[in-house]
Image (cartoon, helix red, strand yellow):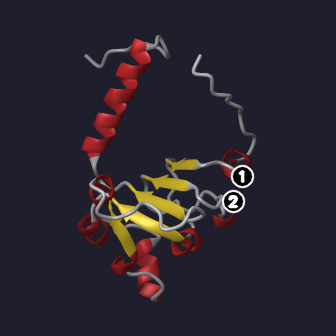
């Protein structure tokens, strides 16, 4: 009904390869895919610590919801804290915050084949807003199953 073809994937690699947007949202605390599965120019969104391979972080343009949160996140946000300890990452490599991109202060991409990585850190307000929007959209389009938390 959306006019979008959806196909089930039998493996994580099949789900990720050749896609433009990858949303990493699992309960794992270790990398759930290989960096080379990510296509050039992909947008990767991560909401949980530890799921990203360090090689992907190194080759990506990294954005965060808050610079301060990434550096002060408790427990430390992986793979960034381990990479910092090894000397191959620092907060200076953060390209910008989401708000800076939205306001046009920082470009999202510098080249069309650049991988953009967005770390959505500890911002439950984002989760609530996105979930509320998705639920209202689904209800308006008769998609999914209505429910109540009351």
Name which quarter of the figure residue 64 lies in: bottom left
In the picture, the quarter occupied by the C terminus is top left
* SS at badge 1: helix
* SS at badge 2: helix
Q: Residue at x 54, y 66 (%)?
A: 111
Q: Label 2: which residue? A: 37
Q: Label 1: which residue? A: 13
Badge 2: few (under 14), some or many (20 or more) residues near its Cα, within 10 Å?
A: some
Does the CB distance between marks 1 and 2 fall below 8 Å? yes
Please tell me which residue lies in front, 64 or 95: 95
Horizontal and vertical percent for residue 148?
32, 15
Horizontal and vertical percent for residue 59?
56, 73
Q: Is residue 21 above or below residue 119?
A: above
Name which quarter of the figure residue 84 lies in: bottom left
Q: Quick one: label 1 or label 2, which is nearer the N terminus? A: 1
Name the residue at the bottom extreme: 87
Q: Is residue 141 left or right of residue 112?
A: left
Q: Is residue 123 above or below residue 108?
A: above
Q: Residue at x 33, y 57 (%)?
A: 101
């Amino acid at each position: 009904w959306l006019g979008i073809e959806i196909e089930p994937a039998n493996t994580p690699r099949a789900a990720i390869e050749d896609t433009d947007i990858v949303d990493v949202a699992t309960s794992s605390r270790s990398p759930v895919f290989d960096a080379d599965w990510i296509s050039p120019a992909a947008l990767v969104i991560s909401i949980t610590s530890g799921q990203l391979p360090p090689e992907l972080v190194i080759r990506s343009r990294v954005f965060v919801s808050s610079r301060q949160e990434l550096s002060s996140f408790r427990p430390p946000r992986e793979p960034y804290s381990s990479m910092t300890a090894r000397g191959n990452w620092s907060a200076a490599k953060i390209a910008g915050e989401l708000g800076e991109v939205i306001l046009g202060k920082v470009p999202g991409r510098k080249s069309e084949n650049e991988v953009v990585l967005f770390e959505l850190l500890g911002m439950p307000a984002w989760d609530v807003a996105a979930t509320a929007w998705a639920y209202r959209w689904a209800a308006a389009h008769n998609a999914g199953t209505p429910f109540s938390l009351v």
